[in-house]
Image: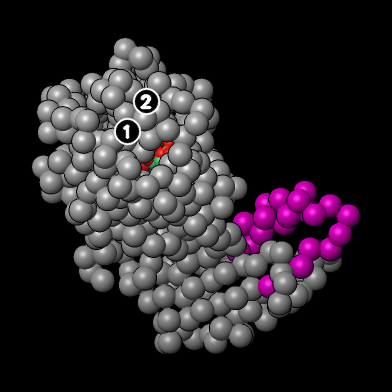
Amino acid sequence: RGKFEESLRRELRRRLSPLGEIQFNYERGRIFILPAEGKEIFSEEDLVLLREESPLIAGVSSVSPGFLLPTDFAAIEAKVNSIFPKLYASFSREYPDKEITYAMRVRRTHKAFPLESKEIEIHFAQELVKSYPDLKIDLRNAELLLELEIRPQHSFLFWERTEGAGGLPVGSGGKLLALLSGGFDSPVACYQMFLRGCNIDFLTFHSSPYTPPATLSKVADLVKRLNQLQIPGKLFAVNLLPAQKEIRDKCQSRYRTILYRRMMLRIAEKLAYRQKAKALLTGDNLGQVASQTLDNMAIINNATEMLILRPLLAAEKVDTINLAQKIGTYDISIEDVPDSCTVFATNDPATKALLRKVLQDEEKLNIPELLQECFNTLEIIPT
Ligand code: ATP
Ligand code: MG
């Protein structure tokens, strides 16, 4: 637990570094993020980053802006009274023409506090209803739920909860090498594995000069974004063209994509060993395209002995797209840029290839030589 909490704090600190010198206050199960010393509250601008980015960090279960107060009833009451008019006004704007349902939930871990949770809840309900006639108590479905945690050192008052990504903190799950294209799926697959605590290096294939420089810069943009959500990983690029040309000239056109993908995996495996990655990661989704039928996936997989993780195997496309939007990769992936896979693409891809036939076809290639030729183009792309 200690280690997990430490990596979570480190990630939060890194992601929130644009906020400058913020303070962290840790308590079992809670991380309080406070403005720099001398600053009473966060600016609206700071709150935007806090609200949007911290819920995406692996290991965060929920995020609530609020106030950290002395554990003292007078201080708590003063704060409730000072923030309530503004809170009430904003809920009235959100629900015009109707009563606003209200409840307070108090949790007391500081048992020595002179008032019981219930007493505090009743006290505020009575006081607030007096001043706000349109406020209606509803303990089950309150729109305005004021929450108060009374802790030994200080108390926390809040009224908003953004669900976080959950999962395990980045860095707790080992290293992966992702095969990253410019599409929607592979970046989301990476994020899914961040949530399982994995740290990821990236490998992308291009076919320069048949693919333009934009093919690489698009992937670099994706990595730049993804690296904000993990301990930054490296982006490697390999030119697949030497292998693609041989495959085009010597093999059946219907196996082209399968043979490309088998070469990709061999190259990725070699790099993964070098980077000490324990497994490969792809955005494969069963049945989505010709190369992702079960038959073809099995044949592609056969090119490597390394474990391949496919977190999106059974995902619905809409869910993937929604997640891409949430993590900020959608707007990059949607740019229309040529992909290495489509170089010399044919319109007769085999959807149910036979391993025996594919292997026969592959015998026409000098695999070790092509592998080396491609690998020689390996470069690290700055992001
Ligand atoms: P994506 O949306 O991730 O591009 P896709 O639905 O377009 O996936 P494919 O093009 O068949 O599906 O690719 C399947 C997986 O193979 C990708 O998710 C990615 O992991 C890998 N891949 C495909 N093309 C490349 C590439 N040019 N460089 C690196 N990996 C690739
Ligand atoms: Mg793709």
Q: Residue at x 46, y 34 (%)?
A: 349
Q: Nearer the viewer, residue 4 or 77?
A: 4
Asked if residue 180 is among those painted magenta in the image, a careful observer would answer: no
- Which is closer to the viewer, label 1 or label 2? 1
Mark positioned earlier in the residue sequence (1 or 2): 1
Q: Which mark is residue 340?
A: 2
* Quadrant of res 20: top left
Q: Main secondary structure of the magenta part?
A: helix
**Residue most extreme to the top:** 209
Answer with left or right where residue 329 lies relative to residue 373.
Answer: right
The relative height of residue 42 versus residue 242 in the rendered view (above or below) is below
Disc ID at residue 69:
none
The quarter of the rendered structure image containing the C terminus is top left
Is the Cβ of the residue at disc 1 closer than 8 Å to that at disc 2? yes
Looking at the rendering, the stretch of residues picked out in magenta corresponds to 80-103
Q: Which residue is pictured at 27% across the width and 50% down the height? A: 302
Instruction: From the viewer's side, name the closer residue of 191 and 11.
Output: 191
Asked if the residue at label 2 sits under 8 Å from ligand 1, the reply is yes
- Compared with 77, 16 (above or below) is above
306 lies above or below 254? below
User: Can the viewer see residue 378 in this picture?
Assistant: no
Q: Position of residue 7 (x, y in %)?
A: 25, 57
Residue 348, x across and y down, in percent: 50, 31
Q: Position of residue 317 (x, y in %)?
A: 56, 47
Above or below 9: residue 259: above
Regarding mark 1 in the picture, which secondary structure is present there?
Answer: helix
Residue topped by disc 1: 260
Regarding mark 2 in the picture, which secondary structure is present there? helix
Mark 1: amino acid: Tyr
What's the amino acid at mark 2?
Ser
Mark 2 residue crowding within 10 angstroms, few (<14) / some (14–19) / many (20+): many
**365 horizontally vs 94: left or right:** left
